[in-house]
Amino acid sequence: MRSVRTQLLVGLILVLGAMSALAGYGIFRSALEEANELFDYELRSVAISLPQSVADTELANRESDDFEGLQDDRVVIQIWDTSNLLTYESRPSANLPRQHAGFQSIEVGERHYRVFGLQQASRFVQVGQPMSVRDESALKQASRTLWPLLAILPLEIALVLLVVKRALRPVTIISRSLAARSIETLAPIDMANATPTEIEPLVEALNDLLVRLDKALHAQRVFVADAAHELRTPLTALKLQIQVARRDHAKLNDEDLLRKLEDRVNRAIHLVQQLLTLAREDAEVSARAGNADLRHVATQVVGELSVLAEHKGIDLGLECTGLTAMESSIVVIGDETSLTTMVTNLVDNAIRYTSRGGQVDVRLCVDGGDVTLEVVDNGPGIPAADLERVLDRFYRAGNATGQGSGLGLAIAAKVAAKHHAGFSVLNRTDGQGLNVSVSGLHRVPADSSATARSSSARLEPSWHTRT
């Protein structure tokens, strides 16, 4: 992968070189045109300044010498009288034909000339100059204008290197700072050192990631510590009971001892299952894509937990409202496995904490495209001081009785959050029991196969359906 520094340097140097070449070409062409204009002006000046008696002067026989800044052997001077008779020619070998007045570019004997003709009262003066002479002199003068540009080019490249290095210094500082950190350091990056505007979003996103990662690791450490503590309690009690049984030489057919041991083992198994479920839900940030028949899920859960409800003499029922006579399924967007876990935990919690002979209702309320799941019981409820903490992991209300891990509501809330649904835990207005609500589940139209499946769902004899 090419680095930003390399891309900037190559790009800036190439652009700078291209712009310098373009500027140099423009300067060169301008200087070349100005030099040609100057030579034209000098040709005209030579023609105007020739004396009337030029044929009788020493000019006719002089050797090469400077004349108005130009050497006369590099300039051809011709004079015709009024009879169109050539009276003077500085270089007969040139043999330039007479041209019209003004500037002309002609070719004679494969040589190009620039000539200027001037009509005077008693004569016609023509001054010519080889184009090769003009081009050579013009190129020399125009080339002199490029030297300053070529001389400053290395300085410009050096400035580009310095500017790019200075501009990328904050990135280098951040990289070195992160490289020097230990694996346990997740503090946000200090942005007090004038972080450039362009990389502020990157630093802010990185800081946000570090904060979330720190929270996740902290939650993981707390989770592991709490899990170890919760597992230690039933396992320690189980170990103590075994030690007491050995000390007292208890028989293996002691029903009371076996019941206690079984209770401890069941508690440990339940806690491990809850921990594994919570770990699975934490591993997935969002729910898997798919659809689930929530009525079918609730029917299965109520049927499976009906044995537990019957054992405690609890009236367990399922109610569905908001459905038309032709509808029998409630298909929502979501992961069926996670939704099953959520409903199971809510119903299991309600049964566990409801007194013998109580009532637990599972309600599915359809309102247009939204579905609300409610689990209502007539148990002891939750003290008002504990309502804000009941969703914390391993937390149990002060009035909780029986065995529990304190993870049921936390798991259900996690599943609801993955499905972008609301989750609330409230005491009933009549002061008898608890109402746990999952609202905002999105319904999709149920097809015929889902309807048939829901209609043929098996109903257990220990619970009943209310409509």
Image: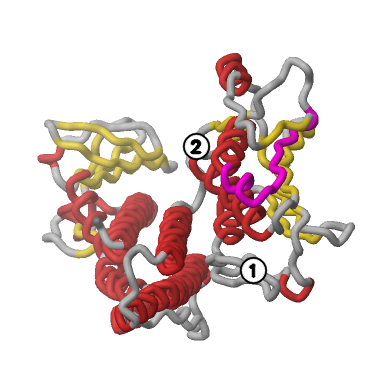
Q: Is residue 340 magenta?
A: no
Query: Which residue is tagged 1?
Result: 401
In screen coordinates, is 117 left or right of 301? left
The answer, for residue 69, to whether it is visible in the render is: no
Q: In the rendered structure, which amino acid carries the disc numbered 2?
A: Ala
Classify 363 as above or below 179.
above
Q: Secondary structure at mark 1?
A: loop
Query: Which residue is tagged 2?
Result: 289
Residue 431, horizontal then vertical, whole percent: 86, 61
Mark earlier in primary sequence (1, 2)? 2
In screen coordinates, is 91 left or right of 258? left
- Residue under the point 63% across and 65% down: 391
Classify 398 as above or below 421.
below
Residue 360, horizontal then vertical, whole percent: 72, 47
Q: Nearer the viewer, residue 247 or 348?
A: 247
Mark 1 vs mark 2: give the one in front. Answer: 1
Q: Quadrant of residue 119?
A: top left
Residue 343, horizontal then vertical, whole percent: 60, 46
Q: Secondary structure at mark 2?
A: loop
Classify 240 as above or below 376.
below
Q: How is the image coloured?
A: secondary structure
Residue 212, horizontal then vertical, whole percent: 49, 69
Quadrant of the image for the C terminus? top right
Q: Nearer the viewer, residue 241 or 118?
A: 241
Label pair 1/2, CB-CB below 8 angstroms: no
- Residue under the point 52% across and 85% down: 192
Q: What separation in Å lies between label 1 and label 2 (alpha carbons)?
A: 38 Å
State the extent of the magenta-drawn residues as a range: 307-322
Q: Quadrant of residue 139?
A: bottom left
